């Protein structure tokens, strides 16, 4: 079916910052939309998110330039094109942009069209989005529900006052959404009650996790284990523990600066610290444990992971970029990858990264950003690609729950 119109508008994300919502109209008059998320602990190798930079409006965060590109040059090349040819549509936008990191038109502009086109193509072929994505990009995979990586305690840039480590996470053992969301929600609720009883604040950070004034990382894991126990769930049986260190955020001149503990550590000491913490609490998955260009530490830690069977996950390190991923696979610098479509700017390139990682035997975690919208696209992407995990925040804030709720819908056959 052919595209008859493309139009973007400015909406606001979960932090009150502008972002794009794009509408694609097909020749039968049907309209299909998508909205793009935005990160806070953004990797320096990510594609460029185009913002206006006009200090008087939205503190420079407006996206009217990106919107203009969608409504003029991108629209012009897509009118009358067949929406089924998503790879062709993405390719045309990449060529029109012409830069390595989508810095001319903006990855946010391009992705909003790429996502809306995927929804329109799913409609045109009379399939749910996940089925379309599966059949178009992931024929080799079996659609399947991901385990939930639930960020129960928020630190780093997402809470901005307590921890250096950004996220303390549980990974549900179950993949069945009606059960996995229940486990996570019961632990989340119990954790809130435990914190309250101990006199800690139960305010939540950007991704819906609690952000208490704990004095150590250990305290965070212990609180989670205790709350889970009180809710009837056991570490390593019903869930596993994980972290997203987002270590680029606390890296300075070759050292890692742990403000909370008031110390600077070398990469070697950080590895030792992770190993001790990992053994003590059975931490199964370490996301961005090192700075985004600290290849040596990533490689060394991944070598250790072979023996001790834990996950080393690239996020800022790999930025959903097939080129960086290829190098990381070759150097065995991680064994799992975060997939965030806005790090690279098109669904086709995100799918390419998923397929490459899968072929290399890596695990896949499809992920939200800290600045989100009510768009649940990543739930369909995770299910349709048979991703191992979905990472979409804690069990609060509707922009996070929208993704869990979409998995529940898919499970119910809706
Ligand atoms: P971001 O954080 O969306 O702020 O980059 C999420 C993450 O690091 O996984
Ligand atoms: Zn991360």
Image (cartoon, rainbow, N blue to C red):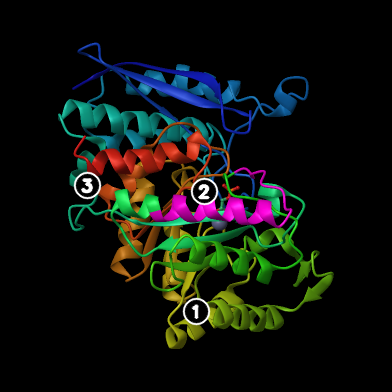
Please name whichever residue, 383 or 49, is drawn nearer the observer in this view of the structure.
383
Residue shown at the point (66%, 71%) measured from the top left: 218
User: Which residue is labeled 3 in the image?
Assistant: 134
For label 1, being within 8 Å of ligand 2 is answered no
Looking at the picture, how far across and down is residue 357, in whole percent?
35, 64
Q: CA distance from mark 3 to mark 1?
A: 30 Å
User: How far apart are the alpha carbons under marks 2 and 1?
Assistant: 27 Å
Circle 1 Cα neighbour tier, 10 Å, few/some/many (<14 / 14–19 / ≥20): many
Q: Vertical placement of 279 versus 250: above or below?
A: below
Please tell me which residue lies in front, 110 or 179: 179
Compared with residue 166, is residue 329 higher up or lower down, i.e. above or below? Answer: below
Task: Name the secondary structure under disc 2.
Answer: loop
Magenta highlight range: 183-206
Q: Which mark is residue 394?
A: 2
Q: How many marks?
A: 3
Say if mark 2 contacts mark 3, CB within 8 Å: no
Residue 191 lies in the magenta stretch: yes
Q: Position of residue 125 (x, y in %)?
A: 15, 30
Q: Is residue 228 visible?
A: yes
- Residue at position x 67%, y 61% in the image: 248
Rounded to the nearest angstrom, the CA distance separating label 2 from label 3 is 26 Å
Q: Quadrant of the N terminus?
A: top left
Q: Position of residue 26 (x, y in %)?
A: 25, 17
Q: Earlier in the sequence, mark 3 or mark 1?
A: 3
Mark 1, residue position: 302
Can residue 43 be spotted in the picture? no
Identify the residue shown where x is 49% and y is 56%.
187
Q: Residues within 10 Å of mark 3 (few under 14, many from 20)?
A: many
Nearer the observer: mark 2 or 1; the answer is 2
Q: Residue furthest right?
A: 262
């Amino acid at each position: 079916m052919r595209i008859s119109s493309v139009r973007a508008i400015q909406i606001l994300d979960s932090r009150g910052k502008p972002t794009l919502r794009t509408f694609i109209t097909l020749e039968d008059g049907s309209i299909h939309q998508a909205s793009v998320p935005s990160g806070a602990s953004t990797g320096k190798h990510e594609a460029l998110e185009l913002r206006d930079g006009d200090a008087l409006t939205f503190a420079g965060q407006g996206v009217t330039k990106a919107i203009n590109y969608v409504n003029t040059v991108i629209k012009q090349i897509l009118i009358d094109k067949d929406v089924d040819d998503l790879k062709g549509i993405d390719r045309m936008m990449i060529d029109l942009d012409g830069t390595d990191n989508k810095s001319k038109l903006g990855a946010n502009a391009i992705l909003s069209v790429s996502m809306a086109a995927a929804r329109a193509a799913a409609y045109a072929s009379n399939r749910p989005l996940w089925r379309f994505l599966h059949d178009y990009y992931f024929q080799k995979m079996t659609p399947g529900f991901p385990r939930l990586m639930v960020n129960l305690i928020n630190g780093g840039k997402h809470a901005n006052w307590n921890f250096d480590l950004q996220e303390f996470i549980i990974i549900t053992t179950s993949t069945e959404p009606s059960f996995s969301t229940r486990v996570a929600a019961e632990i989340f609720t119990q954790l809130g009650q435990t914190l309250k009883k101990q006199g800690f604040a139960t305010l939540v950070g950007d991704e819906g996790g609690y952000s208490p004034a704990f004095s150590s990382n250990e305290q965070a894991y212990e609180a989670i284990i205790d709350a889970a126990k009180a809710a009837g769930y056991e570490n390593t049986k019903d869930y596993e523990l994980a972290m997203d260190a987002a270590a680029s955020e606390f890296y300075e001149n070759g050292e890692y600066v742990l403000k909370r503990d008031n110390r600077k550590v070398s990469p070697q000491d950080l590895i030792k610290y992770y190993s001790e913490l990992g053994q003590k609490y059975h931490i199964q998955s370490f996301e961005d444990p090192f700075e985004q260009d600290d290849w040596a530490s990533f490689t060394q830690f991944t070598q250790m992971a072979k023996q001790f069977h834990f996950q080393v996950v690239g996020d800022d390190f790999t930025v959903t970029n097939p080129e960086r991923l290829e190098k990381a696979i070759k150097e065995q610098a991680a064994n799992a990858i975060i997939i965030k479509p806005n790090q690279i700017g098109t669904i086709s390139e995100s799918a390419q990264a998923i397929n490459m990682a899968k072929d290399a035997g890596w695990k896949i975690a499809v992920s939200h950003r800290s600045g989100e919208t009510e768009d649940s696209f990543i739930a369909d992407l995770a299910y349709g690609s048979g991703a191992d995990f979905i990472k979409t925040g804690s069990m609060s804030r509707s922009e996070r729950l929208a993704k869990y709720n979409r998995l529940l819908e898919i499970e119910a056959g809706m």
